Every structure is written in structure tokens, then in C-alpha cells.
Image (spheres, coloured by chain):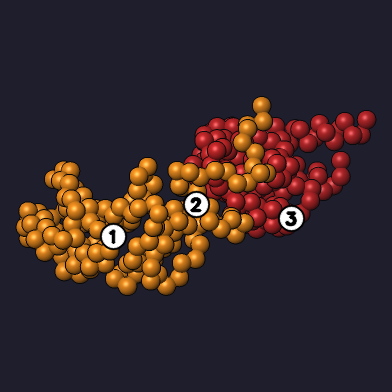
Chain colours: A orange, B red
Amino acid sequence: MTREDILNDLSVRFKDDIIDVFDKSPKRVYVEIKPESIVKLVSYIFKDLGARFNIATGVDTRQHMEILYHFIIEDINLLVSLRVKLPKSKLEIDSLVSVFEAANWIEREIHEMLGINFNGHPDLRRLFLSDEWPEGVHPLRCDYKEWDKKAIRDRGV
Amino acid sequence: MSLKLKALLKSPWVFHLSTGSCNNCDIEILDCLTPRFDIERFGILLAGSIKHADVLLTTGSCNRQSVVRLKRLYEQVPKPCLVAAIGECALSRGMFIHSYNCPVPLDRIIPVDVYIPGCPPKPEAMIAGIVKLIEKVKAGQKRKKK
């Protein structure tokens, strides 16, 4: 399959789930999709198209909380990034661990850093933050405020 | 000078501890030990266990996870022990000073005897730092005698 075939196939097969396709460069395409259809789309890309899961990234923008799932289709060297925009009032999305195990740790990291809940994740414990870190404080959010009163932020000169 | 301290200064065994550095300082420390600089000819030897060490070489900005481990290690060093802070991160946390994960600099956690600045410091700077540390301890001992 060529690049155009795959893009056409995706947009026909999932025309209700895809909101927008942004063709950035010959090697890269961003596909914005609805949050509730993430498992359906990812299973198709991962199992049927044979793409490799690179990583997921979470971004806190001013309006939304975004998650980008990066997949690479190695035969045609195309990087497909599935973009999901979550409203800040409802930070929930289905977990991808049922599709591939590699999503486990990155979902745990996004959960602790940005406070997004992954429904159906088997083990949503902390990954990087220490035990003294308070519950409900997420360091990579825009509105993060320092909670530690004992922290020293000057260079001592 | 006590025999313990005299032996320590004659041949300080160093233990290398990275508290979350970017590995650049660690590479330079390894550079010191390899044949080009070869600090073993001055009697400085890399100790495999903290319980054999005299000098603690610390690199990296201490983050919340490693502060606990650092304290535990410092409790295990046989005293007297000297601490060298290597690199900008260990001195003042460098660019990580406002990081959520690096609340306190190294010298507020354990007493530091010598600061070696640089990002990363050159092996020459590290050797000079250790030599200055030895001289400092010797001078302190002489002053005590008077």
C-alpha cells in the first residue's frame, strides 16, 4: 500500500471517527480523532496495517489536554500521529493496554504527570514521582504551583 | 595528624555517585581514571563499594527520589569522609533550579568539602580539585595542632 492508499482507506473506513487530517510533510501526518474511538482506530492501525507504536505524548494546551499516539508504518516510512483532544472538565480516555502491552508505562507516566485517567488500565500506579509527592498534584500541567514549602529556589549568592 | 586521616590523604579511595546527572560529569570522571590522565598513579582509586571509600564524588542535581538514597549512602561511609561536588548541577542545580523535582541543593543535604564547577568540569579541573581538597585537609590539621 502506498501512502495515499492508506490515507484514503483510513478516511473512508473511519469517516465518523476522524475529525481532521493534517498532512504535514511526506513523512508525517497528523490525524485528529474522537476520544471514544481510540481503541478501534489503534487496533486497525496496529494489527491490520502493521504499524509500530513509537510513543505517546501528553500536552497541556490552553483549551484542551492533548494526547498524541505516534505510530510508524515502516514499509513506507510514514509517521502517523493520532491526536486526541480531551476537554479539561473530563480527563478520561480508554486504555490501550488491551491492544499492546507497550502502552502500559507511558500511560502510567501521563497519568501522574498530567492527571489523565486511563479507563481499563490494569495497574495505574506511580512511575517516576516519589512517595512524598501529594496526591492530585500534577507537575506538567500549566497551572502547577509549587507545593513544597521547604524548597530552596535561590543559588545562595 | 591521626593515622586514619594520614592514610586517607596518602591514597584517597573515591566512590562515584550520580544523583540524576546527564552522565556528562560521569564520563569525565571515568576519563580521569582511564590511562590518559590515570589518577591511580597518585593513589586515587575508584572503590566499588561505599564502605571502602574515603571521598564521595557526587554529580547531578539531587532529585526527590535520589535524595533518600544519597542520605542512606552517606550514613554508610566510614568517617572521616570527604565529599566533592562535581559539576554545575551538584553545585547549584544549574538549569534545574526551578524544577519541581529538585527542591534542595546538595550542600544543604550533606556537608560538601570541595566544589568543582563546570558543565562538565575537565578532568584536569577534577584532579586540581582533589589536590586542593587534600591540601585543605592538611592545612586544617596543622592549624588544629597550633
CA gap, disc 3 and disc 1: 51 Å
Counting from the top left corner in percent of width and height, residue A25 is at 16, 43
| Mark 2 neighbour density, 10 Å: few (under 14) some (14–19) many (20 or more) | many
Residue bearing the label numbered 3: B75
Point out which mark residue A138 bears: 2
Determine contact: label 2, label 3, CB under 8 Å. no
Determine contact: label 3, label 1, CB under 8 Å. no
Determine contact: label 2, label 1, CB under 8 Å. no
Residue B24 visible in this rendered orientation of the protein? yes
Q: Which of marks 2 and 1 is nearer the N terminus?
A: 1
* Element assignment for label 2: loop
Q: Is residue A125 above or below residue A88?
A: below
Q: Which residue is drawn at 19% across and 60% down?
A: A17
Counting from the top left corner in percent of width and height, residue B54 is at 72, 49
Q: Which residue is drawn at 64% across and 51% down?
A: B67
Residue B11 visible in this rendered orientation of the protein? no
Amino acid carrying label 2: it is His
Q: In which quarter of the image is residue B106?
A: top right
